[in-house]
Image (spheres, rainbow, N blue to C red):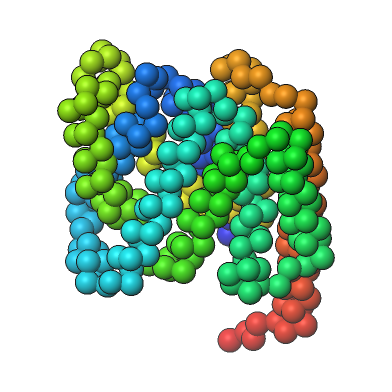
C-alpha cells in the first residue's frame, strides 16, 4: 500500500473513531436517565470509582504502572491532575443533574457553547490573539447568553456551568501538559477523586438513600457499567485525535450536543420553549462563524505549507 493510501485509510479510521466517541457521548442522556432513581451525587460517585477500577484493570493487563511513581513525586503534576479531576467531576455532576431533572436540552446548549467559551478563555488566560471572525463568534455567543438570561428570566446556570467547567478542564490539561496518555490521565484524575466518592457513597448508604443494592440487579449493573461507558469514548477520542486534523475534531464535536438535544426532545419527551430555541439559533450562528473561520484558516495553512515545499524542496542525497 502506498504512503498516501495508507494516510487516507488512517484518516478514515480516525474519523470513524471520532464519530463513535462523540456519538457515545451524545447518547449519554439515555444512559443516565436509565439510572434513575439514583441521584446525581450517587451516579457521580459510582462513575468515579468504577472508572478507576476499569482503568486500573486495563493498566494492570498492559503492565503499565511505572508512571504512577513519577506522578506522586511531581507535586505540580499532582496538583494539576487534582484540579482537572475536580473540574471534570463538576461537569459530570451538573450534566447528570440536568438529565435526571428533565433538562437535557440545557446540557446540550452547554456543549454548544463550549467551543466559544474555550476560545474566549484562550484570550483571557493565555493571551492568545483572535482572528476577526473568532471575535465575531465570541461576541455572538455572549449575545446568546444575554438573550437566555433576559428572555428566560433566570441565569442559564446549567449551560454556563457545563461550558466553563469543560473549557477550564481543557485549559488545565493544557497547562499540566500532555505528559500522560488518555488512560493514565483518567486513572489519575479518578484516583484523586475516589476518597471523596467513597465518603459520599458511605453517607448515602448510612442515610438509606443509596440505590445500588436496593433497586435490582439491572440497576446495579448499569451503575457498574459507568466505568466502561466513561473510559471507552475517551479512548476512541484519543485514537481519533492522533489520526485526523484538529479542524475535523472541532467539527465532529458538534455531533454530541446535536444527539443530546434530539435525545432530550424526541426520546425523553422534554419540552423546549420558543425563547430557548431562539437562544439555540443564536449559538448556532456563532458556531457556524467559528467553524467557517477554522476551516478557512486550515486551508490557508495547507496552501502556505505547499508553497513553502514548492519553493524549498527537500535536498536529494
Q: Is residue 300 left or right of residue 191?
A: right
Q: Is residue 57 left or right of residue 260?
A: left
On the image, the x and y values in percent for residue 296 come to: 79, 59
On the image, the x and y values in percent for residue 116 come to: 67, 53
The residue positioned 51% from the left and 51% from the top of the image is 165
Residue 106 found in image quarter: top right
Is residue 203 among the parts visible in the rendering?
yes
Using the image as rendered, state which of residue 2 and residue 115 is in the foreground. 115
Residue 135 found in image quarter: bottom right
The residue positioned 38% from the left and 59% from the top of the image is 83
Using the image as rendered, state which of residue 294 and residue 102 is in the foreground. 102
Residue 211 found in image quarter: top left
Above or below 158: residue 120: below
Using the image as rendered, state which of residue 136 and residue 311 is in the foreground. 136
Q: Is residue 280 left or right of residue 113?
A: right
Which residue in the rendered view is the most extreme toward the top? 216
Task: State how many labels appear.
Answer: 0
The residue positioned 61% from the left and 57% from the top of the image is 118
The residue positioned 51% from the left and 62% from the top of the image is 171
Which residue in the rendered view is the most extreme toward the front? 153
Is residue 137 among the parts visible in the rendering?
no
Above or below 50: residue 132: below
Q: Which quadrant would the C terminus be assigned to in this image?
A: bottom right
On the image, the x and y values in percent for residue 263 come to: 59, 23
On the image, the x and y values in percent for residue 120 come to: 66, 61
Amino acid at each position: 500500500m502506498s504512503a498516501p493510501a495508507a494516510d487516507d485509510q488512517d484518516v478514515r479510521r480516525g474519523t470513524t473513531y471520532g464519530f463513535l466517541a462523540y456519538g457515545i457521548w451524545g447518547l449519554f442522556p439515555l444512559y443516565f436517565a436509565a439510572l434513575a432513581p439514583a441521584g446525581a451525587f450517587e451516579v457521580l460517585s459510582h462513575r468515579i470509582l468504577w472508572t478507576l477500577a476499569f482503568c486500573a484493570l486495563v493498566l494492570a493487563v498492559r503492565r503499565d504502572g511505572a508512571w504512577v511513581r513519577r506522578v506522586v513525586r511531581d507535586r505540580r503534576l499532582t496538583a494539576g491532575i487534582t484540579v482537572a479531576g475536580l473540574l471534570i467531576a463538576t461537569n459530570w455532576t451538573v450534566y447528570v443533574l440536568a438529565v435526571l431533572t428533565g433538562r437535557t436540552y440545557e446540557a446540550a446548549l452547554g456543549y454548544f457553547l463550549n467551543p466559544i467559551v474555550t476560545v474566549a478563555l484562550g484570550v483571557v488566560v493565555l493571551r492568545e490573539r483572535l482572528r476577526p471572525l473568532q471575535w465575531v463568534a465570541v461576541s455572538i455567543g455572549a449575545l446568546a447568553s444575554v438573550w437566555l438570561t433576559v428572555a428566560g428570566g433566570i441565569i442559564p446556570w446549567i449551560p454556563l456551568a457545563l461550558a466553563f467547567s469543560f473549557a477550564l478542564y481543557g485549559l488545565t490539561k493544557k497547562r499540566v501538559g500532555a505528559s500522560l496518555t488518555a488512560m493514565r490521565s483518567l486513572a489519575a484524575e479518578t484516583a484523586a477523586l475516589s476518597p471523596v466518592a467513597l465518603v459520599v457513597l458511605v453517607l448515602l448508604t448510612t442515610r438509606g438513600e443509596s440505590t445500588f443494592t436496593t433497586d435490582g440487579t439491572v440497576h446495579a449493573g448499569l451503575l457498574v457499567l459507568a466505568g466502561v461507558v466513561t473510559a471507552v469514548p475517551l479512548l476512541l477520542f484519543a485514537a481519533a485525535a492522533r489520526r485526523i486534523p484538529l479542524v475535523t475534531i472541532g467539527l465532529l464535536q458538534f455531533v454530541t450536543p446535536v444527539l443530546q438535544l434530539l435525545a432530550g426532545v424526541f426520546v425523553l419527551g422534554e419540552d423546549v420553549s420558543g425563547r430557548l430555541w431562539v437562544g439555540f439559533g443564536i449559538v448556532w450562528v456563532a458556531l457556524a462563524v467559528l467553524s467557517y473561520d477554522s476551516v478557512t484558516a486550515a486551508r490557508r495553512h495547507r496552501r502556505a505549507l505547499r508553497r513553502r515545499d514548492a519553493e524549498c524542496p527537500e535536498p536529494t542525497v
